[in-house]
């Protein structure tokens, strides 16, 4: 936990805030690698190594690692790509699986012992992935319909009186090009930010009540807070996996929309 949220002697308990998400260089002054950056690097390596091991000795009768890898990959293929896009979505399963497992790993790092920080609470990471998804589904639409046809179908859908286009066209353009990646980014970032902040508050608040406030009331309240943090940790783990699923599902839906004749 960041030292900025610890209680200062004589000043009472200091509530955690945005400073909780600010980390100094991990290897001392003069270096640039921070804890969130390390989580991204190690998380990426963990996903890559796991699926390499799962596919390295593929067999008709899978071993444990291959079975787990195939099951996880099959979840993205069947429950996201096929459900959201249909058979054309099989082409995009590698991308969707990469996004899902990368996000799931970085999200779940928020409740892992010793790590305890969701790297996706830093807006740059969700924004980068949202921009990639945005470029991908727009590129798919342009490839299918041509640049003019794509933006024509996007901004001027058929069957609408022409005066409405004056208002509808810019709304559709902003919605597709700006709002979609923005909502993907903010939904994930704020969920990870808020969840981590609440966990820090319960844990540090419980610790303060037990060791600093003392007394029967302090110990009782602190114990309740710490026990509550265990429940919140389990709930946060569910939310972290859910948000990885939602981000990937919405990316798949946007790709599916770009593959339709009108979107």
Image (cartoon, grey):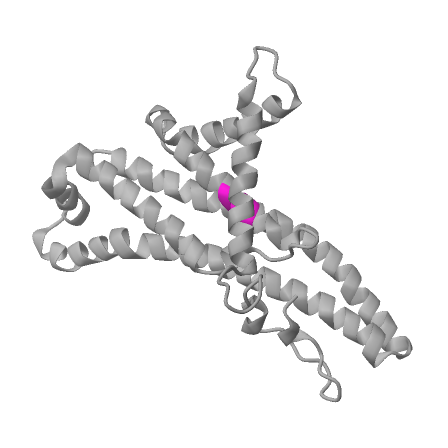
Q: Which span of residues is magenta-colored?
A: 102-106
Lateral position of residue 127 relative to residue 11, left or right: left
Which residue occupies the foreground of this view, 158 or 178? 178
Give percent across and percent down for residue 74.
51, 26
In the depicted structure, whether residue 92 falls above or below residue 43: above
Lateral position of residue 226 relative to residue 79, left or right: right
List the single residue furthest toward the right: 216
**Quadrant of the image occupied by residue 105:** top right
Lateral position of residue 25 relative to residue 200, left or right: left
Give percent across and percent down for residue 69.
57, 27
Give percent across and percent down for residue 14.
67, 80
Q: Residue at x 57, y 13 (%)?
A: 59
Q: Residue at x 13, y 56 (%)?
A: 164
Lateral position of residue 119 relative to residue 179, left or right: right
Please identify the dominant SS of the magenta region: helix
The answer to whether residue 242 is visible is no
In the depicted structure, whether residue 211 falls above or below residue 241: below
- Residue 123 colored magenta? no
The answer to whether residue 235 is visible is yes
Q: Residue at x 10, y 43 (%)?
A: 148
Give percent across and percent down for residue 107.
56, 50
């Amino acid at each position: 936990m960041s030292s900025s949220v610890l209680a200062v002697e004589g000043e009472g308990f200091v509530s955690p805030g945005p400073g909780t998400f600010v980390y100094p260089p991990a290897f001392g002054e003069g270096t640039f690698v921070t804890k969130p950056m390390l989580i991204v690097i190690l998380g990426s390596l963990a996903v890559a190594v796991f699926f390499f091991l799962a596919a390295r000795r593929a067999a008709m009768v899978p071993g444990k690692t291959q079975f787990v890898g195939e099951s996880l990959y099959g979840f993205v293929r069947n429950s996201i790509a096929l459900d959201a896009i249909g058979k054309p979505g099989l082409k995009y399963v590698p991308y969707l699986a990469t996004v899902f497992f990368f996000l799931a790993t970085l999200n779940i790092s928020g409740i892992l012992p010793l790590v305890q920080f969701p790297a996706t609470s830093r807006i740059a990471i969700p924004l980068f992935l949202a921009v990639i998804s945005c470029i991908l589904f727009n590129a798919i639409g342009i490839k299918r319909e041509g640049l003019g046809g794509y933006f024509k179908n996007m901004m001027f859908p058929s069957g609408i009186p022409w005066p409405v286009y004056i208002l509808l066209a810019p709304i559709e353009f902003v919605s597709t090009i700006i709002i979609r990646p923005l909502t993907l980014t903010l939904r994930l970032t704020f969920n990870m930010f808020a969840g981590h902040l609440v966990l820090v508050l319960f844990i540090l608040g419980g610790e303060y009540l037990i060791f600093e406030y003392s007394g029967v009331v302090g110990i009782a309240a602190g114990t309740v807070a710490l026990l509550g943090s265990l429940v919140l940790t389990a709930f946060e783990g569910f939310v972290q996996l859910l948000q990885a699923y939602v981000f990937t599902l919405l990316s798949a839906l946007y790709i599916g929309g770009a593959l339709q004749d009108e979107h």
